Image (cartoon, helix red, strand yellow):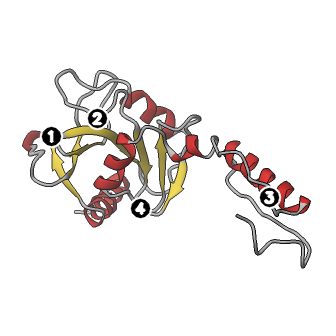
Amino acid sequence: MALDPEQLARQNIDAMLAASGWAVQHKGAVNLSAQRGVAVEEMSFKTGEPDYTLFVDGKALGTLEAKPEGHTLAGVEEQSAKYVAGVPFGIPYWHSPLPFCYESTGKETFFTNRLDPEPRGRRVFSFHRPETLLEWVQQEKQLAQKLREFPPLIITNLWLAQIKAITNLETSFAEGLLRALIQMATGSGKTFMP
């Protein structure tokens, strides 16, 4: 019997989750202590039923929405945002609303850290390991916030071109730009850019 496109996607997603340290379980047979990271299929939330709910050390911290290969993931982010706001009563969680959302076809995967100052989906190669997400949820500030709060630049012994380049780079980090490039002439001080 041939699998439909979403079942094929879930097979790939299950394999990716397992490779990243997650145990995949159905909601009818949940054992949150089976492994550090557990992905429970089809849990019922107040706001719907995410395809997977992610638990680390027995507490929920995210969801994963599965779609068939070829499905555009851009609009699925809104669906994920709806789920994380409606954690069922009695379910232990690390943070409310749940901070981490994935959308995946098994070939393409997007990740959103809702603890960021301006959350947005980013393409990732696979799922993060459970201990990585646990470390992030326990941090006082996320990387995106830290990149907005650099200490003052110590300009002693820096050339004007270096000061300008470093300041522009810090501004690009603070604005959350995805790419930054320092381009300077030969001999202008690129090698020593603290």
2 or 4: tag closer to the N-terminus: 2
Quadrant (top left/top right/bottom left/bottom right) for the C terminus: bottom right
Out of 48 and 133, give the one closest to the viewer.
133
| 1 or 2: mark nearer the eye | 2
Task: Give me the C-alpha separation between circle 2 and circle 4.
Answer: 22 Å
Determine whether the residue tagged by mark 3 lies in a helix, strand or loop: loop
| 3 or 1: mark nearer the eye | 3
Q: Which residue is mark 3?
A: 156
Residue type, label 3 = Thr
Residue type, label 4 = Ser
Residue 27 - label: 1
Task: Give me the C-alpha separation between circle 1 and circle 2.
Answer: 19 Å
Residue type, label 2 = Trp
Q: Which residue is mark 4?
A: 126
1 or 2: tag closer to the N-terminus: 1
| 2 or 4: mark nearer the eye | 2
Taking the spot 83% from the left edge, 62% from the top edge, the residue there is: 158
* Up-down relation of residue 56 to residue 87 (above or below): below
| 4 or 3: mark nearer the eye | 3
Q: Residue 182: image x %, image y %?
A: 80, 64
